[in-house]
Image: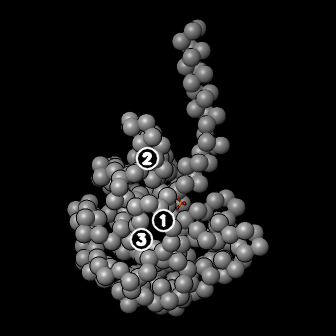
Amino acid sequence: MTGPLRLGVNVDHIATLRNARGGVHPDPVRGALIAAEAGADGITAHLREDRRHIRDADIRRLKDEVPLPLNFEMAVTDEMVAIALDVRPHASCLVPENRTEVTTEGGLDVLGVAKLPDAVARLTDAGIRVSLFIDPEPLQVEAALKVRAPVVELHTGSYCDAPAAERDRELARIVDAAKAAAELGIECHAGHGLAFDTVGPVAAIPTIMELNIGHFLVGEAIALGFGGAIKEMRRLMDAARA
Ligand code: PXP
């Protein structure tokens, strides 16, 4: 399974910034529309149980107002399955969720989550493409096949966080898991922690079809866009005084 590599832009942390002030700015939907203009192939958003960034209304607006496929990241809970069945995103990526974690720390233990096979079946029956967020382990890929998930997303966090001396070893784990997925006919995605200096070797794996990237892009917007916002503010101030 090879083909063009899609970019899913995760807008969670636009919402993190918005929520820091409790208002409506910056708007993750506006960010998603900018992502669409900039060449993203899809939008990803994670509605966490504690709603710490994306909120229910954001998910609905992302589905209704953005002309790109929505990948709804969700924990394997009855509440989230019900929301997905109501919103009908293009895709659902099932992730482990722990209230106290800062971000999704590891992949799913696919056979260890009792509700997972039923969730995969119900979402699939509704026409939603299901992916399972897993550590890059061939055993987890095989488990994904057992629960009939058509897609896995490999957690690239360990690779991205690894010291330079260990990065090749972590990359090899991703290569092996991607190979296992291809052999089993499972579509392979990857994401978490990817940045300009880490994306290349993952993007070069030919059977990986999609990368989901968020935190780095939102942070890097400061370098690539902060100056433009300041210039516009300066212009408005100067125009008001003219
Ligand atoms: N893929 C999944 C399943 C995730 O949980 C996340 C983080 O929400 C990402 C990709 C994107 O990670 P990052 O924000 O570090 O780019």
> Where does residue 78 sit, x and y in percent of width and height?
25, 69
Name the residue at 45% across, 53% down: 12
> Where does residue 16 sit, x and y in percent of width and height?
46, 47
Q: Secondary structure at mark 1?
A: loop
Amino acid type, mark 1: Thr
Classify 42 as above or below 122.
above
Q: Which residue is under mark 3?
A: 96
User: Does label 1 or label 2 sit earlier along the sequence?
Assistant: 2
| Lateral position of residue 42 relative to residue 38, left or right | left
Amino acid type, mark 3: Pro
Pick out the residue farthest to the right.
165
Report whether the residue tagged 1 is closer than 8 Å to ligand 1.
Answer: yes
Q: Residues within 10 Å of mark 1 (few under 14, many from 20)?
A: some
| Lateral position of residue 102 relative to residue 149, left or right | right
Q: Secondary structure at mark 2?
A: helix
Q: Which residue is under mark 1?
A: 104
Q: Residues within 10 Å of mark 3 (few under 14, many from 20)?
A: some
> Where does residue 48 sit, x and y in percent of width and height?
37, 59
Name the residue at 51% across, 67% down: 105
| Lateral position of residue 25 relative to residue 64, left or right | right
Tell whether label 1 touches label 3 (CB within 8 Å).
yes
Amino acid type, mark 2: Ala
Q: Which residue is under mark 2?
A: 15
Pick out the residue farthest to the front.
100
Disc 3/disc 1 C-alpha distance (Å): 7 Å
Tell whether label 3 touches label 2 (CB within 8 Å).
no
